[in-house]
Image: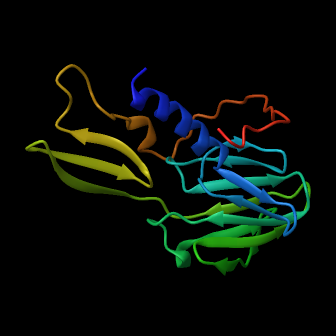
Amino acid sequence: MNCCTGNASMHLYRVWRDMTSYDPKKKIFKVNLLLNKAAKEADVYSWMPNRGHVEIKPKVDCFVAVRIPSWAGRDSCAFSVNGESAEAVWDGKYGIVPAKVGQVIALNVPISEHMEKRVIMESEWATTIRGSTIVDIQPKGEWGAIHCHPEYRSDDVKIVRRERYVHPDVLADY
């Protein structure tokens, strides 16, 4: 096995594992990456990159701390609890809101697209980025489109209902 293959799979697991974290002493559930995830302490539902909307449904009474991405300014963030506006306390890049079991904590932030140009191996590439997601690359690939995701470039979200499962053990040292 090449080192990239083995390391990539290991680090994909670590990214998934660390998307959320929970500190039982401080009772803080942190959302570090705004993607869907089921955890013992809360479930995260994300509409990114179509819409700048994330919901957290806590399974324990706690503080919910949401890491705001670099492309979203603190002033543009709107938190709510069960649909009612809520003021977040800020700790660096994290907006923190108190939460109880059964509540829905939501973050809304305007999402926009921007283009970045890069020169890679003497070729110029233009990437279109929506939020944190590359939705298009120009020029297109020789044998097929690279990162061509028109479905992410609108507010319409394809919702797929799935039963969520949280395994009782986490491979903490992997």
Task: Reply above or below: 49 against 67.
Answer: above
Q: Nearer the viewer, residue 59 or 114?
A: 59
Q: Is residue 143 above or below residue 8?
A: above
Q: Position of residue 123 (x, y in %)?
A: 10, 42
Instruction: Determine the residue positioned at 7% across, 44% down.
Output: 122
Foreground pick, 2 / 41: 2
| Residue 54 horizontal side relative to residue 140, left or right | right
Give the number of callouts: 0
- Percent position of residue 64, x then y: 76, 64
Please tell me whether residue 22 is drawn above or below residue 70 in the rendered image.
Answer: above
Would you identify the image quadrant in which residue 146 lies? top left
- Residue 65 is situated, as x and y percent measured from the top left of the image, at 71, 66
Residue drawn at point x = 61 percent, y = 55 percent: 53
Q: Residue at x 84, y 51 (%)?
A: 41
Which quarter of the figure is the N terminus placed in? top left
| Colouring rule applied to residues | rainbow
| Residue 114 located left or right of residue 40 | left
- Left-right relation of 135 to 75: left
Find residue 172 and report its horizontal and vertical position in percent: 72, 43
> What residue appears at the point 33 percent right and 35 percent down from the top-left corner?
147
Residue in front for this viewpoint, 1 or 76: 1
